[in-house]
Amino acid sequence: LNLCNKNMVKMDTNNNDGKARHKLLLEVCMAAKYEGESLTRYHTPHQQTYGASASQLCTVLARSFADIGDIVRGRDLFYGNPQEKDQRDKLDRNLKEIFGDIYKDVTNGGKNGELQKRYEGDEDKNFLKLREDWWTANRAKVWYAITCDVVSGKYFRHTCNGGNITYNKCQCANTDVPTYFDYVPQFLR
């Protein structure tokens, strides 16, 4: 996911204005949008050459969506090419700082004792619980961003809540995310 890294690596982590979680959502959604555009653009010539079902694009997008989720949650196992190591390390540091700012924001002032208790005990300051909660809260927005340029596409089976099929653009009518690849360990995808 070079596009994801490229976009998110530029995030300003020195801004302590309490808006880190909103800026992170914007950056992740922009990265997802560009990733979706790229995959959609290359899928059409591939489909013309090799033929494919309408569900294939949805599956490709779902796998990329899951990779974005792994990056955000600090679970990504793919470290890229050796040439990209510095960029990857910078992205990891930036995400740590951003989630540190979000942690300070949501636990500030002693009024959020429940959140302080939930997120305590993170000696490495990786904020893995907070990252997981952030992803859970925002995964539908990220899915919408990665699929916003899809013209058509349906999953090969009923994947929406209630047993419904994706109606168009790899999206469910009720805004549910039609995939759970982001909860499948990366080495099994």
Image: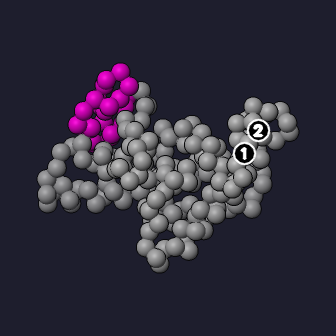
Distance Cα–Cα, label 1 vs label 2 = 10 Å
Left or right for 117, reference 49: right
Q: Position of residue 115 (x, y in %)?
A: 73, 35
Q: Amino acid at mark 1?
A: Gly
Q: Which mark is residue 174?
A: none
Q: Position of residue 116 (x, y in %)?
A: 76, 38
Element type at marker 2? Answer: helix
Q: Main secondary structure of the magenta part?
A: loop
Q: Is residue 100 above or below residue 79?
A: above
- Give the residue number, with chain letter if any, for mark 1: 121
- Mark yes or no: residue 36 visible: no
State the residue at coordinates (70%, 49%): 122
Left or right for 98, reference 165: right
- 178, 89: nearer the viewer: 89
Q: Is residue 15 above or below residue 105?
A: below
- Give the residue number, with chain letter if any, for mark 2: 116
Count neighbours of disc 2 (C-alpha within 10 A) and say few if under 14, some if 14 to 19, many if 20 or more: some
